Amino acid sequence: MNHTHPPVLIVGAGPAGLVAALTLLQNGIPVRIIEQDTKPRIGQRGPGIFPRSLELFNFLGVSDVNDMGKPFPCIRGYKFGVAEHTHTELVVPRTQNTPSIPFNVPKLIGQQLLDVILRRHLDKLSCSVEFGTELRSFKQSDEGVTAALAKKQGDDEILETFDAKWMIGADGGKSTVRKQLGVMFPGEAMAEFRIVTGDICLAGPGLDRTYWHRFGDLNDKCVSLRPTDEVGEDGWHFFILGRDIDMTKLSQNEELIFETIALLSPMEITFNKIVCASEYRCVVSLLCVCASLSVSFRANVRMVDKFSDGRVFLAGDAAHVHSPTGGQGLNSSVQDAFNLSWKLALVEKGLADKSLLETYNEERLPIITEMLEVTTSILKRAMTAGGTDAWRTTLLYMLGIHCRFSSIVLDEFSMPVEGKPINTYRILDETELEAGDRAPDAPKLLHVQPGESDLMTLFSLYRPWRHTVVVFVPSPTDATPILAALEPYDKHIVQSAVILPSSAPATPVASPADFVLLDQGDHAFSAYLVEATQTRVFVIRPDGVIGAIVHGAEGVKKYFSRIFRDI
């Protein structure tokens, strides 16, 4: 690999671009990541991080997101002109961590802080975002992509031509990459949903900072104030909604924002400053969801008809924009980036055929289509009922999202049913598990190889640069033929873990496996729905998805034949 000339150009340094860069770098693939803005953007924007994304950040070694994020506070609701709150409601369901779901509590962390965290991890890998660098145009061929860049230096502009083998467009809803790629991005502005949102510093004796305060209703006029220490001790994230409010004028006038909040809130408030404010508009998709919406209300959504063309890929808002309700946008964006990047890394290393990259579009397109339907439905209900009751579902935790339909997953225990709906967006059902599903965690696994006595979790094994073959067997000898089938594969890209039931002796086991783990609490056998007397093999992909569930060695070979070149 040429470390002085990175093979991958990433356009856009929001969460999607940063996660793509971090995933590729951890796979040993150098990247160049550019950002048109001259300095990091400020503001909370999409602050809700849901459990599936927290798991992916854990696989990337970015535990800071979960550690620094705050649980969702309860909402205190008020009617206009009433200083006393009328009710309290949950924003998301109350959930607790479990052995199989160790990140089951959604967290709030502003995008400004999230970006800082991700850039710090890039710095550790000797990669920095190039701010003030704009993509002007590009051309691609069978061999690579030639990008025309413009870099700002004070009042001057330096033009540059950069040759890359691959390019990822993560440059937001107004994506230059998407526009020049020429993919369809259908949508039509109909009845618009508009808000002004941002961060503000204010104080009020009646504003308890343990609550998220909402004055009015979402179906009429509303102001929302959520406390956030990321902005300061008097910091709040706000949004203002109103059918007869000039949102464009409001977003550009600090004093008018103060006046509007004061008018819609009966509290005595002292305003200090506006940190940032912007207008948000949603635009509706004729492709995905319009047919299901009433005449009186239509949400705004856009989505590409394909996520890639040749050597150029789209991720995050560059590929899909939609209602902020449900908090799925940023989460979907980082999951786009993770799905793409482990595959791109294998292709760039020459370990996988370029055809593997076609599964990025194959897997993400149905998931994002259903995600847009979910967020639109939530927005419709919020605007009709005036509250956030539609948020209170673990569907939004994204743990039940699957790609069972993917051409590269293999399940020898589940027979496909012709004509059965894909239903990629579903609530997690822990009583069923198929290839293409999220891989569960399991704690208290005792490492019983000679000289080892550590307690481990399955999640501690899953990383973005390798597949993990998890072999459930009654005894170590039952794993021998399966482990023999793994000998041709580099241990850096394929590792093995033998899982023994709690009934097995807790004595040292010599084995060619990378790990031999005793399931002391029966958490692994339970989560993976395996009986102690059974042999069953799970191949976990670098993105924490179950790539295969097979009987033994032949199934493992068959799965890897779909991923790797001939070995």
Image: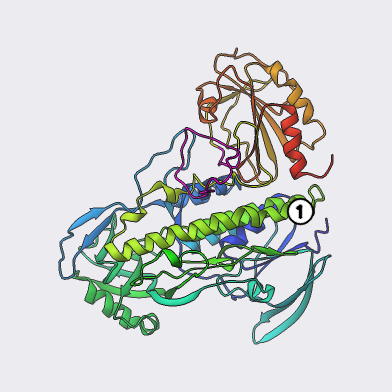
- In magenta, the rendered stretch is 416-439
Tally the marks.
1
- Examine the rendering and report whether any part of residue 5 can be seen: yes
Mark 1 sits on what residue?
A: 355
Front-most of residues 54 and 354 = 354
At x 77%, y 52%, the residue is: 347
Q: Is residue 484 left or right of residue 170?
A: right
In the rendered image, which quarter is residue 386 located in?
bottom left
**What colouring method underlies this structural image?**
rainbow
Which percent across, then down, holds residue 279? 42, 76
In the rendered image, which quarter is residue 483 located in?
top right
Which percent across, then down, holds residue 278? 43, 76
Front-most of residues 46 and 527 = 527
- Vertical order, 121 against 220 (above or below): above
Which element carries disc 1, helix, strand or loop? Answer: helix
Front-most of residues 492 and 338 = 338
- Vertical order, 107 against 295 (above or below): above
Q: Quadrant of the C terminus?
A: top right
Magenta segment's dominant SS is loop
- Examine the rendering and report whether any part of residue 22 can be seen: no
Which percent across, then down, holds residue 29? 75, 54
Furthest residue in direction front, as rendered: 419
Which percent across, then down, holds residue 553? 74, 28
Q: Is residue 493 one of those drawn in magenta?
A: no
- Vertical order, 386 against 174 (above or below): above
Q: Which amino acid, mark 1?
A: Ser
Furthest residue in direction bottom, as rendered: 155
